[in-house]
Amino acid sequence: MSTELLLLEDVDNLGKAGDVVRVAPGYARNFLVPKGVAEPVTEAAKRRLAKLQAEREAARKAELEAAQKLAAGLKDAKVTIRAKVGEDGENLYGSVDAAQIAEGLKLVGFPEVEPSMVKLEENIKTIGTFDVEIKVHPDVAQVVKVWVVAE
């Protein structure tokens, strides 16, 4: 025996929002329905799901537009980071990491950039000019010039 439900949200190993699934009655009664993740299949549930999907799509579009606007602003951004240099004049005592680059971007007018958005394969350990990718959205990224200079 199973219960038929309409998923309102994505559920791992079960389905995506909008799917009609068959589950054990206890799973439906004790977990899915009380958490608001699913509802019994009715016309009202289908209308509610359509409304939720429209709201989510509008939010996704607004988020994507904001990310594209930020990426367009970052296109010409340049960050200079001063760091202590060793005796050879080229290698840094420490390294420049994503947090320092994000802080540098905040100083030049991009407070939205978080260290998690800065994609470095490894920390910068020498002076010079580097192209660093800033991933502002899963679908939007922009490359920024970073100059690491001797302090």
Image (cartoon, rainbow, N blue to C red):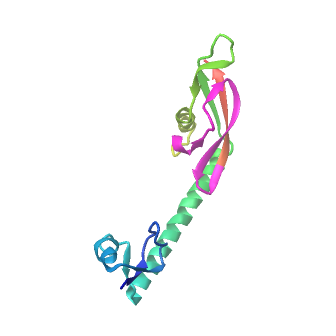
Which image quarter holds the N terminus?
bottom left
* Residue 92, horizontal then vertical, whole percent: 62, 20
In the orientation shown, which residue stands out farthest toward the bottom? Answer: 43
Above or below 34: residue 135: above
| Of the pair 106 and 102, the residue shown nearer to us | 102
Residue 48 x, y percent position in the rendering: 41, 80
Above or below, comparing residue 63 to residue 112 in the picture: below
Q: Position of residue 90 (x, y in %)?
A: 69, 18
Q: Indicate left or right for 45 with 90 as reference.
A: left
Question: Residue 148's quadrant in the figure?
Answer: top right
**Residue at (57% x, 38% y) in the render:** 105
The chief SS type of the magenta part is: strand
Above or below, comparing residue 23 to residue 59 in the picture: below
Q: Residue at x 62, y 16 (%)?
A: 85
Q: In x, y percent, where is residue 51?
A: 45, 78
Q: Which residue occupies 59% across, 60% down? A: 65
* Front position in the image: 64 or 39: 39
| Apparent side of residue 148 relative to residue 51 in the rendered image (left or right) | right
Q: How many marks?
A: 0
Q: Residue furthest top?
A: 87
Q: Please tell me whether residue 127 belongs to the stretch shown in magenta.
A: yes
Residue under the point 63% across and 25% down: 125
Residue 124 part of the magenta segment: yes
Q: Is residue 6 left or right of residue 99?
A: left
The residue sitting at the front extreme is: 1
In the visual, does 133 lie left or right of 9? right
Q: Which residues are magenta?
A: 114-141
In the rendered image, the quadrant that contains the C terminus is: top right
